[in-house]
Amino acid sequence: MGLVALCGGCGGGKGEVVRVVGSTSVEPFAGELAAEFNRNNPGLYVEVQGGGSTAGIKAVADGYAQIGMCSRSLKPEETGFTTITIARDGIAIVVNQANKVGGLTREQARDIYEGKIGNWKDVGGEDKAITLVTREEGSGTREAFEHLVMGAARIARAAKTQNSNGAVRQLVKGNEDAIGYMSLGQVHGELKALTVDGVKPTAEEVLAGKYPLVRPFLFVVKGKPGDAAQKFIDFVLSPPAQAILEKEGLVRAK
Amino acid sequence: MAFAAIAGLALITAFIFKEGFPLMVKAGLRDFILSDEWRPLDRLAPRFGIFPMIVGSLAVTAGAMTIGVVFGVGVAILLTQFCPPRLVGLLKPAIELLAGIPSVVYGFMGLVVLVPFIREHLGGSGLSVLAASVVLGIMVLPTVISISVDALQAVPRPYYEGSLALGATEWQTTHMVMLRAARSGIVAAIILGMGRAIGETMAVIMVAGNTIAVPHGPLDSVRTLTSNIAIEMNYAAGDHRKALFATGVVLFVIIMLLNTAALVLSRRRAGGGHR
């Protein structure tokens, strides 16, 4: 999708450029919206780049980018920015379709990922060792999972590490004992998304504020954004753009 | 051309040392290499210990070379000593074709065929040292076979005929004359194969599980040095990024040590002979 967005601008390449830099979780969605925006606004060009949430915020601070993309809440030391929630994303805890467990509490999920619970039978499943699957250090999804589920606890070292949602999906799909986590919009029905604290991981429950594992997708700006940047932000928050995000598996901002 | 290659090598070396070395000093060289705590993003107490990855790389490479050398040199002997030349002309190019298969394909085959097989028959999660070793072992075969065959074919014909004429059997001739005469070539084949095994990344990421813990057996998951860099490069910044370059420095040093050792070994042994 990012590629499509980039090439949407290849033809024109002129006019005022708005740089949007940051989280690779937000990038594909922002890219799609940018393609749409560029099509309807000749003379303006929104350019979307990845690099990660932290890099995006730094780019805004340095003045390289007008808008930063961030897939987590700002850290205490990241001050002086204005954040705009453009959408929300649920983090689903996923297991193999064959797994009998239907749900976990957040405490159970934490104990499993910390390594305190090592067998599915302790959470109502079969007598089988749990295979933990996690994301790599630096991943926004991992950061959100650590923040929302782990708290001060650390993910056990025995966890297998995969570096994309797709790789996590592949592993959990192929291993009946595995547990993983990923963006709610990425589950695609091939995996079983567990209820958390008894709440189903669906867009409705996220919107209703009931599903507990939710992270914001933010646009970060410093001071007052320029006219062009503001125009893109307004577009992203408009109903048609929000509908696009929803179709892609995210949950509307409001 | 040759100078350009050397200049390129020097530039790369200087660059990874410049980027990585300060962090090794900051984290403590000893801790960096011997600690098994890798928590590059811990806000209170980041730790940069790559011991598990060093062990992982060595274990996977050793496993791969066991498979690669036994089968590779074995096949090379079969092809050169016991096979009609016309068949060799057919088989050798076919084996070399194996080298043209992209590593991601090997990794994917490993993930969908080998990993479930290990999980069902041997236990564990299947993502293991063993799976990575087997996949890499197959990947190094074309290199090992092809260069070993060339080395064996380069042994002067009179050696072979002389040995047979002295009453040695074909097998005695093979292992006492041919293998000895071709030794340095075969060692070169093994070194090149080893270089490929220790440097391979994509296929290993897919089948090794990438756990940051020292493996205790062939069925445990491991993360290799190359995987560590590739997996975490995407979002790494600041010290984390430097730590990945430092991982590269360690990898570089290990490869240099292995190559030097292998070269010295082959020279010393071949020293008595006349080539």
Image (tube, coloured by chain):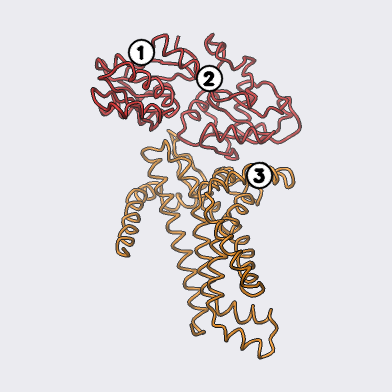
Chain colours: A red, B orange
Q: Are marks 2 and 1 in contact (CB under 8 Å)?
A: no
In front: B43, or B82? B82
Q: Hey, which quadrant is residue A233 in on the image?
A: top left
- Identified by mark 1, the residue type is Phe
Q: Hey, which quadrant is residue A204 in on the image?
A: top right
Residue marked by disc 1? A235
The residue depicted at 49 percent of the width and 78 percent of the height is B268
Residue marked by disc 2? A90
Q: Residues within 10 Å of mark 3 (few under 14, many from 20)?
A: many
Output the chain of dot 3. Answer: B
Q: Residue A224: x percent and y percent?
A: 26, 15
Which residue of the protein is positioned furthest toward the bottom in this rendering?
Answer: B166
* Residue A117 shown left or right of residue B248 in the figure: right
- Identified by mark 2, the residue type is Gly
Residue marked by disc 3? B115
Mark 3–mark 2 distance (CA, rounded to whole Å): 30 Å
Q: Residues within 10 Å of mark 2 (few under 14, many from 20)?
A: many
In front: B64, or B142? B142
* Residue B273 shown left or right of residue A41 in the figure: right
- Identified by mark 3, the residue type is Val
Q: Secondary structure at mark 3?
A: helix
Q: Secondary structure at mark 2?
A: strand
Q: Hey, which quadrant is residue A12 in on the image?
A: top left
